Amino acid sequence: MKLPFTMPASRSSRLVLAALAVLAVAGYFFIGRGNSLGATLAIVPGDFKEQVSVSGTVTAAQDVALGFAANGRISGTYATVGEHVEAGTVLAETENGDLVAALAQARANLASLQAGTRPEELAVAATAVTNAKAALVDAIQNAYTTGDDAVHNKSDVLFTNPRTSPKLSFSVTNSSLGMLVERERTAIEPVLADWALLVARLTNDNAIDSAKQAQVYLAQVSGLLADENGALNQGVPDQTTTAATLSSYGTTLATARTNVNTVATALTTAATALDAAQSTLTLKQAGPTVDAVAAQEALVRSAQAALAKTRVVAPFRGVVTRMDAKVGEIVAPTTSEISMQSDGIFQIETYVPEVTIARVAIGNPATTTLDAYGSSVAFPSVVIAVDPAETIKDGVPTYKTKLAFLSADPRIRSGMTANVVMETGVLHDAIVVPAGAVGVKDGVSYVSVVEHGAAAFRAVTTGPAPALGQVQILSGLSSGDVILLSPAP
């Protein structure tokens, strides 16, 4: 049993086939099973074509006025009056050098993304990682050398027996601080020994982990130097340690602290540089993401659309009947500069009611059937003109609309009655049902939903009909609901 409504329009031919298959199976199951309630339909949201259906008359070829889609200064005209041109021929264009360049750049960027990272770039990125590892190894070694020097060669002058039983060589006002420094000096000796072993085993491969440990060791050295400086500031001169000696200790200690701070910064910088180099290599190895390619493809389409607005293109094969466009002239979208007459291709003249004219635009594709050949023979066509002013037909405002057949066909003759279905858009993820499935009771639109083997009343909110014989349901139905094709009274 064939469902009396247009199938959903999908974004690709495969989705269309899938949708047809699903609905065909659903229709067989719910309609062919012999349900005593009558024919049913399972609700499946989808993409549905918006269509406008009208009748018209085939007419002989007529003039079509063409103009630019955007303001601009004409830079070239490429056809003369009486010249035959093919569909798609550029008849004239405005200044668009920047848009041509933008499109070329967008296409080049897309090609670069699709090609992926070149081997040469990967090699450069890999070399950068190797160099960054080597630099980090140098930074770790320098940090150890500087830390060891700061303790053994500079700050140890503050102690007696610094490596075995360190004691400050001067008195400190705060005795607790003095003892803390002596304990820290004792503790730093094995730290420096461990650090020396780490440096001895250091390689490019373990540089990252070694750098983290080196930063810990360096922080311990820095803490010792800071506490030593505090003790020195509270030092008390005596017969063995004069004020001048304490001052010289302070100078030496300040140099040690500066050196340690410098290598600490260098170590952090080297670690950060290696992390950045590795991230760059990883990104280049991964190549472009699907989203990045899709985004660049969108930029190409946008650039193409912007360029198209600067050109007047022949919508069909025909003869140029007017060429008022002149190089250097400033034009606006409201002005027609060029006219064409279709070459051996008939047109359709029809009148679209006011209620649906807002959905009709030049360029809308259409399917036309002729009474002479029946509804099974379809002729593709396209909307080429829509009158801006109304024409009253039987007291109803309508708008004269012209369509052109996309190709010449000897079967088409002037005066034939045409039935036109124009595609004006797509309703995405919509619920659309046959118009006969919706009833009205007490001013409320409703459908009959099959629940537990019985028909239940359910109020729905309807929207504009996307096509003849269809109704869009805005609310009241959900995916998976099953309704009667003829609502219960």
Image (cartoon, rainbow, N blue to C red):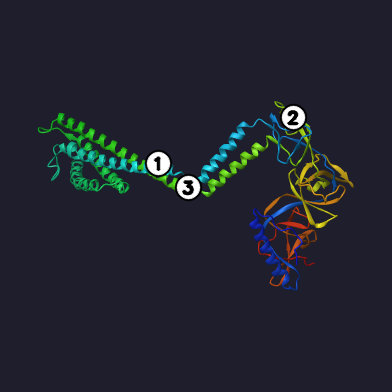
Q: Of the residues shown, which amino acid type is indicated by label 1? A: Val
Q: Which of marks 3 and 2 is nearer the N terminus?
A: 3
Q: Give the x, y percent position of residue 232.
A: 20, 35
Residue 355 drawn above or below residue 310: below
| Residue ranking furthest to the right | 394
Q: Give the x, y percent position of residue 400.
A: 83, 43
Q: Quick one: SS at disc 1?
A: helix
Q: Give the x, y percent position of residue 236.
A: 16, 34
Q: Of the residues shown, which amino acid type is indicated by label 2? A: Ala
Q: How far apart in space, not on screen, are marks 1 and 3 (Cα)?
A: 15 Å
Q: Quick one: SS at disc 3?
A: loop
| Residue ranking furthest to the left | 239
- Would you say 236 lies left or right of 217 here? left
Q: Of the residues shown, which amino acid type is indicated by label 3? A: Gly
Give the residue pinned by disc 2.
325
Residue 443 found in image quarter: bottom right
